[in-house]
């Protein structure tokens, strides 16, 4: 008898990511010892409320008497009015001359990435992933029929190792995934870093006679601190596809709403957008949730409450470094990367559980010897968790 099921899919379904494993452990542990004794830093699940405009938008939408306008299907790539709003937002904020014809509404950034990878892959192409990286990049790439190629980071800034990046590019390279602000390190790629990446891609594209695309994964674009700027990659490189989600900027992670934006200047831009639409169709990612498309049309220009995240960052970073931890000070996103006092980050993560601390080991992110703490939690939880962090570090002395 042949195989009953796809073995890769069985494996993905059986072996969840370390992030999800910790999240599920935390829910179970909270029932056993009480939620106040579990300090869950596992998941990037924003605690900061959605803007008031989101509530007002929902109230407006559900009051519309024509149910087809509220709950009905939209066009497969998204409602034209919504795509126009997104394109105008990009045009106004970043100066890119883009229209709705290059915007595809999706069920969040994960769908955007899966669609983009599927659209670009032609014959088991290689896709470069810069460490540290969101672990699902590998899963998404493999599922699209591509081959992930991981390039190490450089310390202490956690930017790309440019020499190794250039060496990693081959004639089979189709694209590179750039995630800035970065999950898990919180690093933000400077304009100089983007220009260096672009110079390498231009050189290699010319060498091999094929365009190499950038897939810019940008769900944390608006969450940056101080005077830090996030370069909009389409302004630096024509062959760019942007994958975006409102999960973080509008605190809507469970609503799964985002988009793919194809640069109008990309080589074969119209065909690439058609491939995005085709990939969405092939995978059943058509007609993103209608209500949330309408919310985005109303709230497309709204920004997150960065101050709340910055207060959390400062409290956690300053407190842990005072205790003796070594941490990467994040310029963006809402993750703190903590160097573990022993080489085995998984062992450290398991020990942390004894103190109620749920910290994700960096091995799956391509960064051994670190754990990730998602500080998009209540400020009160951070304060309550600090004695546990102190006991944990003291246990190594």
Image (cartoon, helix red, strand yellow):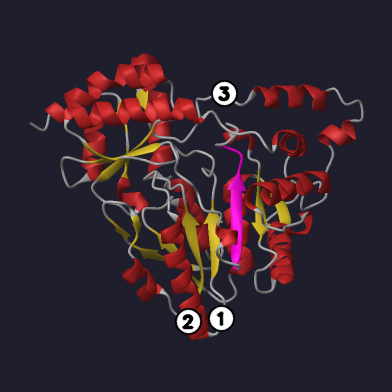
Task: Provide the secondary structure element on which disc 2 rests.
Answer: loop
Q: Quadrant of residue 131?
A: bottom left
Is residue 243 one of those drawn in magenta? yes
Q: Is residue 216 visible?
A: yes
Residue drawn where x is 37% and y is 69% of the image: 165
Nearer the N terminus, badge 2 or badge 3?
Answer: 3
Residue, disc 2: 171
Q: Position of residue 353 (x, y in %)?
A: 27, 29
Q: Which is more toward the observer, 159 or 287?
A: 159
Whole-angstrom CA distance, mark 2 to mark 3, is 46 Å
In this orientation, which residue lies closer to the viewer: 70 or 220?
A: 220
Name, please, the residue furthest toward the left. 397
Q: Secondary structure at mark 1?
A: loop
The relative height of residue 45 versus residue 126 in the rendered view (above or below) is: above
Residue linked to disc 3: 49
Residue 36's place in the image compared with 111, above or below, is: above
Sequence-wise, which precedes: disc 2 or disc 1? Answer: 2
Q: Is residue 34 among the parts visible in the rendering?
A: no
In the picture of the structure, the residue carrying the numbered disc 1 is: 210
The answer to whether the residues at label 2 and label 1 have Cβ atoms under 8 Å apart is yes
| Span shown in magenta | 239-247
Left or right, 150 with respect to 145, comes to left
């Amino acid at each position: 008898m042949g195989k009953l099921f796809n073995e890769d899919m069985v494996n993905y379904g059986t072996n969840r990511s370390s992030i999800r494993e910790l999240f599920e452990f935390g829910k179970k542990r909270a029932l056993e010892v009480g939620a106040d004794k579990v300090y869950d830093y596992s998941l990037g699940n924003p605690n900061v409320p959605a803007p008031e405009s989101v509530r007002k938008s929902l109230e407006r939408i559900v009051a519309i008497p024509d149910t087809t306008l509220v709950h009905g299907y939209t066009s497969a790539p998204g409602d034209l009015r919504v795509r126009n709003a997104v394109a105008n937002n990009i045009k106004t904020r970043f100066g890119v001359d883009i229209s709705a014809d290059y915007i595809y509404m999706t069920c969040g950034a994960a769908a955007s990435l899966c669609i983009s990878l599927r659209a670009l892959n032609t014959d088991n192409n290689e896709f470069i992933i810069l460490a540290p990286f969101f672990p699902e990049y590998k899963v998404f790439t493999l599922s699209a029929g591509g081959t992930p190629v991981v390039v190490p980071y450089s310390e202490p800034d956690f930017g790309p190792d440019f020499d190794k990046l250039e060496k990693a590019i081959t004639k089979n390279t189709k694209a590179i995934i750039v995630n800035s602000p970065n999950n898990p390190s919180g690093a933000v790629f400077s304009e100089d870093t983007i220009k260096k990446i672009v110079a390498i891609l231009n050189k290699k594209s010319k060498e091999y006679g094929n365009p190499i695309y950038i897939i810019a994964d940008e769900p944390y674009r608006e969450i940056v601190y101080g005077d830090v700027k996030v370069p909009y990659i389409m302004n630096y490189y024509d062959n760019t596809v942007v994958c975006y989600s409102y999960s973080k900027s509008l605190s809507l992670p469970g609503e799964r709403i985002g988009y793919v934006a194809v640069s109008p200047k990309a080589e074969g831009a119209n065909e690439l957008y058609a491939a995005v639409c085709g990939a969405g169709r092939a995978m059943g990612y058509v007609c993103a949730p209608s209500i949330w498309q309408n919310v985005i049309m109303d709230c497309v220009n709204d920004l997150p409450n960065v101050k709340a995240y910055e207060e959390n960052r400062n409290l956690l970073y300053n407190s842990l470094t005072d205790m003796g931890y070594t941490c990467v000070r994040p310029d963006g996103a809402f993750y703190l990367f903590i160097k573990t006092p022993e080489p085995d980050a998984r062992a450290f993560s398991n020990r942390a559980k004894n103190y109620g601390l749920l910290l994700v080991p960096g091995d799956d992110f391509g960064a051994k010897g670190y754990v990730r703490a998602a500080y998009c939690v209540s400020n009160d939880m951070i304060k309550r968790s600090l004695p546990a962090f102190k006991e944990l570090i003291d246990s190594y002395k």
